[in-house]
Image (cartoon, rainbow, N blue to C red):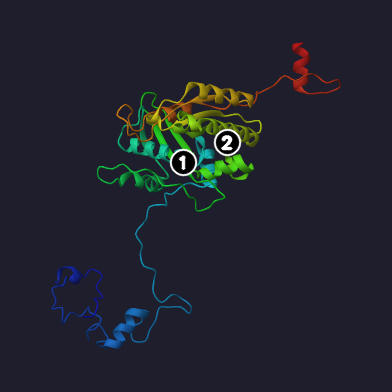
Amino acid sequence: MSPCNDSDCTFAVTGVCVRGNDPEQCPFRQGSAEAGGGALSDDEELSSQVTGSHHGGSDLSPGAAVLSAPREAPSLPTSRTLSIVDVNAMMESRPTTLIGVLGLPGAGKTACLVSAYLLLAKGQFRNFSYLHSETLRAFEEIAIGSRTWSPGEAPAQITAHTTMTDDREAGFLHLRLKHQQKESRHDILIPDLPGEWSKALIDRADYARLEFLNSASVIWLVVDGREFVEVGSVAYARYRTQLLIERLAALLGDSRPCLTLVPTWRDAGQFPLAEYESLKTEGKKFGFEVTLSPVASFSLSEGVSPGEGVAELIETSLVHRSEGPEFWPVEPTVEGTRSVAAFRSVHEQ
């Protein structure tokens, strides 16, 4: 049946002509004689539908598209990790806390982030509630391994090893949280980096990919807590962590954000206080303040809850700020100089 020329026609929906005519005899149908010109043949009707022509006429201009583009439903924006460009734009638009993360392969960096995400999803993130994230899809991708446990059997490794599409640039995860007691809102950016980057920093002084750490308010040094508990591995684990602190000092230049030592696998044993004091002393040699914040991203121990220490790690990271330069330092006067600073120094003397 030919289409109707009446814009108010509802025959296609109701099956009844809006004007009360017999559909076969309605004068507004394109194929009727009353509509002008007689009925189209099957070939002419098909041609009219494709080209928009009627009896050889056409509204198309030379070079125009034969068919209009289909109407597409709006789609959600991509929600994977943010790039350096995205991070810079966010930090320029509103107050944002950038947390740096370093740690050797298998230390538990990604597991810590997954644990934070799952606790937020369950409303069990101490003192904080979830507001927004620009990278929900990225969080879901790294958390999917924790949702596929075999019945009655815990997996040997809960999160997949971090790999990056672009090995030259970091990918950042974003969280916007609300502190329930202080009513304050915090935008947090945390990179999810493969441990090979930290290994390359230690072994080859590969600084280029980690330049963004100069903008970090605090840096997590994530270590496998089990290696510091076991006698056979503690010496090597301490040595590698000391090298990481030394390399980090060279990378940051004069900047000295707070370093937070984050031993994972809190459920496997208490981090030795002597080892913390040793690394704290090592940090002071390079001008760092080192704090301790052990976590149990996931736990198989009855005495330690899953996610223990993760919320506290985030909260302490939000209060640490690297010290800025003195706003107006007093410098010694130089004979013959004419400057406000020099005048102030002479006047104060």
> In the rendered view, would you say 12 is above or below 51?
above
Q: Looking at the image, tell me whether mark 2 or mark 1 is earlier in sequence order.
A: 1
Q: Which mark is residue 187?
A: none
Q: Can you give x and y, in whole percent of width and height, for residue 105 in the image?
A: 49, 42
> Label 1: which residue?
106
> In the rendered view, would you say 321 is above or below 157?
above
User: Is residue 150 found left or right of 279 in the rendered image?
Assistant: left
Residue, x 61% and y 23% (percent of image)? 284
Three-letter code for the amino acid on which mark 2 is drawn: Ser
Label 2 – label 1 distance at C-alpha: 25 Å
Q: Can you give x and y, in whole percent of width and height, for residue 31 in the image?
A: 24, 83
Mark 1 packing: few (<14 Cα in 10 Å), some, or many (20+)? some
The N terminus, quarter of image: bottom left
Mark 2 packing: few (<14 Cα in 10 Å), some, or many (20+)? some
Q: Specify the quadrant of the image occupied by residue 20.
A: bottom left
Q: Which mark is residue 215?
A: 2
Residue, x 54% and y 39% (percent of image)? 92
Three-letter code for the amino acid on which mark 1 is drawn: Gly
